[in-house]
Amino acid sequence: MKKVGFFKSIHFKFVVVYILLILIAMQVIGVLFMDRQEQKLRENFTKNIDENADMIEVNVEEELENILTQSDKEAPQQRLSSLLQEFPYSDIDTMMVVNIDQQIIAANNEDLVGKKTTRPVVSQALLGINTNDIFQNQEGDKRTYVVAKPVRSGQNGQLLGALLIEASIEDIYELSRTLNEILANATIIALAITALLGIILASTITRPLADMQKQAQVMARGDFTRKVKVYDKDEIGQLAASFNDLTKKLQEANEITESERTKLRSVLSYMTDGVIATDRDGYIILMNDRSEEMLSMSRHEAMGRFLPEVLGLEKEFSIEKLEESSNSLILDYSSHEVPFILRASFSVIQKDDGPVNGIITVLHDVTEQEQIERERREFVSNVSHELRTPLTTMRSYLEALEEGAMQDENLAPKFLNVTQQETERMIRLVTDLLQLSKMDNKDYRPNFQKVNLRELMLLVIDRFEMSKSEHITFEKHISDKPLPVRIDRDKITQVLDNIISNALKYSPDGGKVTFHLNRDGNSVHISIKDEGVGIPKQNLSKIFDRFYRVDKARSREIGGTGLGLAIAKEVVLAHNGQIWAESEYGKGTTIHVKLPTHQTREASA
């Protein structure tokens, strides 16, 4: 954050406001005080002059009456001049007595006696008009208080003359100017002291505020360890304490938020489903690791892209349709080699009845479920087909017997024999299905026991050698040493029976079945090879699937159910072993089985 300039800071503003308040207060007080003081001094001065004028007027009246009534006029005039010249009031500049002819008959200045005056105030006084006013000279640098009074006889009120007094009032204004200067100097000193005190006082306010500002900047960077110093217990101190309390609560809230974010991140990271979140416009803002794997797209590539575009739905669905969609969508990303199917479920992010803020998309891999569902349908179809064929055959022969073939001594035994074979075939099919169902059960456990696999395999081979066709030969490469293993004897016997039975069924006349048994590290390796028609390479991985036949017509002719190798695979896997096939079309097939020589105690339990 940019630092605030000094002249824009609250510190400067506080000091300026404080100084302005003091300045305005001093100015208002000064103006009111000086105006009042000047007015008071002027009133006192003029009142004093007026009182002196009244006192002089009494003496002047007496002497003027003497001048009019007595023959000796010089003596009264001499007394008037002495009165005016000896008057003790020093502020009076000029005093004169004028007769009705405007002739000065006495004055405090001898040079004026005997002269005539034409001053307007004197003329007005001789007309009976009093004058009490302040006059300013032409230069404007001197002000004088002038009193001009008519003098009348106390007996008959006859106008005897006029009295003129002039007193300089400039000292009053000079005193006012001096007081103004003193007040101005006092104001400057007060402002300086006020500024200093304002700075100190402002610091006590702005220092905690500056600390809180720094704390806010530190908090914005995610550091909640710093505390604001509480300088006092006033309102600012309470604000600082509240700020520290807020910092603590924000730290706790941030820790909770970070903990929840970490939990959410962990949940999203370890979810087996993909999760994608968008903003209100449908653009991706969040994507977990699983969704990256499912869509084969990195998070950086997907961020900011349109959701329907990323899911490949931009032609069929808009973002509004996805928001309104209550059903999940099946997304098929399968290739020719690898099946891959996803189910996408959509949920809107919305507060109560507010606007939609985004969409949460959950991607679930349903490839295995779809495969299981397809296998289930194929299984039902295969079982129905496998049962339908013998049942149809049996129905046909039974109908023929019912219609009269029973009476035919040649046909009846044949028809009954076919019916019996088809019945046994259905029994074998149901038996194999029950066995597979039992092995699919999670609770299934082989009955492990210690068995010499060499003896067991030779026993099984000898049994088949007694019942095989004379046109098929056996070639045995069996280890001379005992091969002890922990196996379920009956189940492994069934595996060998199924594999050898298939080898015999598909071997042509004159063919050979080759057996190998030897130790291979911690395992024993069994291989059984025939010289039949072989299996095409593209079908080799499917021969262990249930009901799978390379040549379905020939398999049914020789009585196969299509479950033998499927059962063999389940048994070998239950023994923690391996089974696989090698074949070259037209040259025969080899089935390999590997069994571990030792099973764990838990497995044998």
Image (cartoon, rainbow, N blue to C red):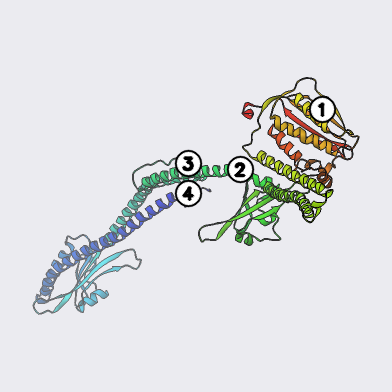
Disc 4 versus disc 2: nearer the observer? 2
Along the line of sight, which residue is nearer the eye, 111 or 573? 573
Q: Distance between the residues labelled 2 and 1?
A: 49 Å
Regarding residue 467, the answer to whether it shows in the image is yes
Kindly identify the amino acid type of the residue bearing the numbered disc 3: Phe
Instruction: Give the residue pinned by disc 4.
Output: 6
Q: Which residue is drawn at 56% across and 59% down?
A: 356
Asked if the residues shown at circle 1 and circle 4 are in contact, with their CB atoms under 8 angstroms apart, the answer is no
Q: Residue at x 23, y 61 (%)?
A: 41
Q: How far apart are marks 1 and 4 (CA)?
A: 98 Å
Along the line of sight, which residue is nearer the eye, 232 or 532? 532
Instruction: Give the residue pinned by disc 1.
Output: 516
Kindly identify the amino acid type of the residue bearing the numbered disc 2: Ser
Q: SS for tag 3?
A: loop
Say which label, 3 or 1, has the lower sequence index. Answer: 3
Instruction: Give the residue pinned by disc 2.
Output: 269
Instruction: Give the residue pinned by disc 3.
Output: 224
Say which label, 4 or 2, has the lower sequence index. Answer: 4
Disc 4 versus disc 3: nearer the observer? 3
Kindly identify the amino acid type of the residue bearing the numbered disc 1: His
User: Label 1 crowding class (10 Å Cα cut-off): few <14, some 14-19, many 20+?
Assistant: some
Kindly identify the amino acid type of the residue bearing the numbered disc 4: Phe
User: Label 3 crowding class (10 Å Cα cut-off): few <14, some 14-19, many 20+?
Assistant: many
